[in-house]
Image: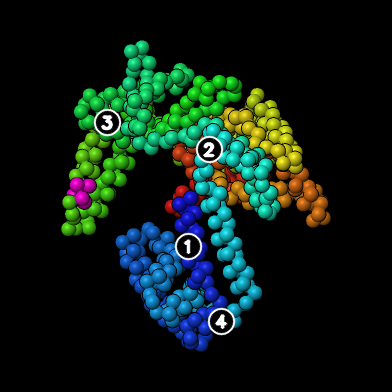
Amino acid sequence: MKRSQFQLEGKIRWLEMLKSDVELVESSGVSLDSLRTKAAEVLVQFATLNTAETQSTNLKKAKKRKKAQNSDSNNLSKNLFETYRNTEDNLTRCAISYLLKNSCKINEKEEDSKKFAQRRRKVEIQIERLKEQLETRIPKGRDLTDTKWLETLFTATHNVPTNEAEAKSWQDSLLRQSSKVPFPVAYESNEDMTWFKNQFGRICVKFNGLSEHSFQVYCDSRQLHWFQRFLEDQQIKKNSKNQHSSSLFTLRSGRIAWQEEEGKGDPWNLHHLTLYCTVDTRLWTAEGTKLVIEEKAEDIAKIITQTKDKGDLNEKQLAHIKRKNSTLARIHNPFPRPTKALYKGQSHILVGVSLGLEKPATLAVVNAVTGEVITYRNIKQLLGENYKLLNRQRQQKQALSHKRKIAQTLAAPNHFGESELGEYIDRLLAKEIIAIALNYFAGSIVLPKLGDMREQVQSEVQAKAEQKSDLIEVQKQYAKQYRVSVYQWSYSRLMANIHSSAAKAGIVIEESKQPIRGSPQEKAKELAIAAYHSRKIN
C-alpha cells in the first residue's frame, strides 16, 4: 500500500505538470519558440552537470561506465523533477514541463492534440485505478459477532434503497462470508518469542504482549529439531550473559494465526492456533554461519564507515557507532553448530526451468560452455507417479469455477475453498528439480522473470489459436475455451517453493527473461544459456 501510495502521489504530480504546448504558452506568457529556447538553456545546464558527474564516476569506477551512461537520462529526469518542485519561476517550470513530456528533448514538430489528449487520459486512468486499488486494500475488520451483518439486514428490511449502488452494497454485505477468527499476529523480531520447557519437558513459547500466557508446541517429528534449535540458541545467549548476537539465531521471525475448523462448540475449543516460523537454513551449520557472519560484518563495517565520513558526529551518531561495534564483536562469537561441507556445483552446469500454461514446468540441464543439453525433463517426468495429481487439480479447478459462475448468476455466496493439492504439487516439483540439480552438480538454477509471464502465456494461447484458424473470431473463441480447459498455475508459488528448497541445498538461484517462441524444452535451454552469458557480461 505504501508503494502504491507513492506511485499515486507521483502520478498526480505528473498530471499537474503534463500540459499541452498551447497550455504551456498561455501559462508562461511567451511564444512557443521562446519556450523552446528556455527549455534548451535548462537542458544544456543540466546535461553539462550530469556529464561532469558521469565523468567523475567513470574515473573512479571504470567497470561501471556503461551502466553510468545508461542512467544519464534517468538522472536528468530526476534532477528536472526536483528543480520543478524547488523553483518558483513560472517560465522555468513551463520549460521543465516541456522537456519532461518530450523525453528531455526539444521537439521541433507541431504537437498532435489527439495523441496528447490520449496520453493525458492514460495518466488519469492510471490515477483512478491506483485510487481504487488503495481503497479496496484498506483492511476491513472481521465481523466476529455478526453485528454488521445484522445491522445491514435490519436496514435492508426496513428501508428502500435510494439507488442501485446502495442496493448492491447491501446485497454484497449480506452475501459476504466473513472469517470467524481474528487476524494473524506477526512477530518480526526473533526475540519477541521466548522459548522454554515446562515441568513435563515439552517445549513452550511466550510472545511479547501475551507474556501471561504460555503455549505448548505440538508438531511432527520432522519439525521438532527446529524448535529444539530455537530453545538452544536462546539458552546459550542467556547463559553467556549476552555475549552472543541474536542476529545469528536460526529463527528469524514468526506469525501466530487461528486455523479454522468446522463443527459445533466454542470458537476457542473448535479452532486452534498455528505458529509459522521463518528460518535461515544457512545458520544450521558452522560453514553456513560463517558465510552469514561475513555478510553481516561487511554491512556493519559499511554503515560505520559511512557514518564516520559525515564528520562532526553528535551524541546519537556516536552511540549508534558504539552499538554497531558491539554488534560486530558479538557476531564473531558464533553459536556452536554442527559441521557440514557446503555444496559446490560446477559453474558452467545450469538447470533452466521454463514455465508455461499447458505444461507448468519444463527442465533442461545445460552445459553453458559447449551449449549442449545434458538432459531434459518434462512435467510428466518430473512428477512421475504423481502426474495424475496434476489432472485431478485441473478438474477441481474447473469444477470450482463452474460452481462459482452459477453462484454469481444466482447472486449467492461464491467463496468456495480450494484444497492444498496445488501447493503439494509445487513441493513435489521443487523437490525433484533440486534433486536433479544435485545429481548433475549444477552451479545454479535459472528461473524466468515473473514480470514476463503474462506476455508468455498470452503468446502461447495466441499461437495455438492462430494454428487453429485464420479467422479472428474463431481465434478469439478458441483462445477463450483454451484458457478455461487448462489450469492457470500459480507460478509465484512454484518459484517460492523452488527458492526455499534451493536455499536449503545451497544452490544459487538466477533469473533471466524467458524466450517467447519455441518449445518448452527450447525455452528452458535458452533460459540457462542467456543467464550464463549475462553472468559473464556482469
Q: Nearer the viewer, residue 64 or 346?
A: 64
For marks 3 and 2 on the same chain, the one whose residue lies earlier in the sequence = 2
Q: Which residues are magenta?
A: 316-320
Measuring from the top left, give residue 145's x and y in whole percent. Answer: 54, 33
Depth check, mark 2 against mark 4: the one in front is: 2
Instruction: Classify 15 as above or below 460.
Output: below
Amino acid on which the number 2 mark rests in the picture? Arg
Q: Secondary structure at mark 4?
A: helix
* Residue that badge 3 annotates: 334
Residue 219: mark: none
Amino acid on which the number 3 mark rests in the picture? Pro
For marks 1 and 4 on the same chain, the one whose residue lies earlier in the sequence = 1
For marks 2 and 4 on the same chain, the one whose residue lies earlier in the sequence = 4
Badge 1 density bin: few <14, some 14–19, many ≥20, Cα 10 Å = few
Instruction: Classify 18 as above or below 537.
Output: below
Residue 22: mark: 4
Depth check, mark 3 against mark 1: the one in front is: 1
Depth check, mark 1 against mark 2: the one in front is: 2
Residue at position x 28%, y 23% from top? 235
Depth check, mark 3 against mark 2: the one in front is: 2
Q: Secondary structure at mark 1?
A: helix
Residue 10: mark: 1
Measuring from the top left, give residue 4's x and y in whole percent. Answer: 49, 54
Residue at position x 60%, y 29% from top? 420
Residue at position x 40%, y 63% from top? 68
Amino acid on which the number 4 mark rests in the picture? Val
CA separation in Å, label 3 and label 1: 46 Å
CA separation in Å, label 4 and label 3: 68 Å
